[in-house]
């Protein structure tokens, strides 16, 4: 279930708010300039190619490109049997920023985005059909869990702008990880 948990930076042991209501999640994130949407489900095979995934969501992707100026879209998939899963998970567990928006649409599976917004951290468990757009310059990190299973559409203005610039903050180490907030993949 898609969930938003909001933590005070200095009280990471317990969220001050938790909601699983998509409309409330969208509203609370919009108040912080974070785009969150849910797109309709498309029937796709688990092993659908990048071309098949992009074709299935062509209308939504093209509308987002027109609205936000994105130039390209691609598809990334990761499964629990990937021998690099530990290294890939570790790569995104530290707080970082990008010089362009980080946009993800979850075609299948789930992942946990943490957004460090002032003195709060918004932990957004995104699942199938969820789209999140983290504005450029927003400190954040991503936890795909120890047994990742997801396929996402990514949109870019310039793929080179998506390189992580680490902040050096240790806040990511103080908040609950995927295993605590998401449990087993659903």
Image: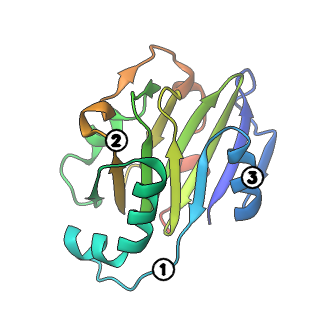
Image coordinates for residue 121, horizontal then vertical, percent: 66, 33
Residue at the far top in the pictured view: 168
Q: Residue at x 81, y 39 (%)?
A: 16
Image coordinates for residue 45, horizontal then vertical, percent: 29, 83
Look at the image and name its color scheme. Answer: rainbow
> Which comes sooner in the sequence, label 1 or label 2?
1
Q: Residue at x 72, y 22 (%)?
A: 119
Q: Residue at x 60, y 54 (%)?
A: 36
The quadrant the N terminus occupies is bottom right
- Give the class, few, some or many, for how many residues have Cα within 10 Å of label 3's Cα (few <14, many ≥20): some
User: Closest to the observer: 64 or 54?
Assistant: 64
Q: Secondary structure at mark 1?
A: loop
Residue for badge 1: 41
- Give the class, few, some or many, for how many residues have Cα within 10 Å of label 2's Cα (few <14, many ≥20): some
Q: Which mark is residue 89?
A: 2
Image position of 140 (left or right of 25): left
Residue for badge 3: 27
Asked whether the beta carbons under mark 1 and mark 3 sit within 8 Å of each other, the answer is no
Where 176 sits versus 180, above or below? Answer: above
User: What is the CA distance from the residue labelled 1 to the residue labelled 3?
Assistant: 22 Å
Q: Nearer the observer, disc 1 or disc 2?
A: 1
Where 37 sits versus 161, above or below? Answer: below
């Amino acid at each position: 279930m898609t969930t938003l948990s909001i933590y005070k930076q200095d009280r990471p042991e317990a969220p001050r708010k938790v909601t699983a209501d998509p409309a409330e999640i969208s509203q609370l994130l919009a108040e912080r300039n974070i785009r969150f949407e849910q797109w309709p489900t498309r029937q796709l095979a688990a092993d659908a190619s990048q071309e098949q995934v992009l074709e299935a969501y062509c209308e939504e992707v093209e509308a987002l490109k027109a609205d936000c100026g994105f130039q390209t879209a691609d598809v990334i998939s990761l499964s629990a049997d990937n021998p690099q899963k530990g290294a890939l998970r570790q790569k995104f567990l530290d707080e970082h920023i990008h010089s362009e928006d980080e946009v993800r649409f979850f075609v299948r599976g789930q992942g946990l985005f943490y957004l460090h917004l002032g003195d709060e951290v918004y932990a957004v468990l995104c699942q199938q059909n969820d789209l999140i757009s983290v504005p450029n310059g927003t400190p954040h990190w991503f936890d795909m869990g120890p047994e990742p299973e997801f396929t996402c559409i990514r949109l870019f203005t310039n793929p080179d702008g998506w390189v992580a610039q680490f902040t050096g903050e240790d806040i990511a180490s103080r908040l609950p990880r995927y295993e605590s907030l998401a449990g087993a993949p659903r």
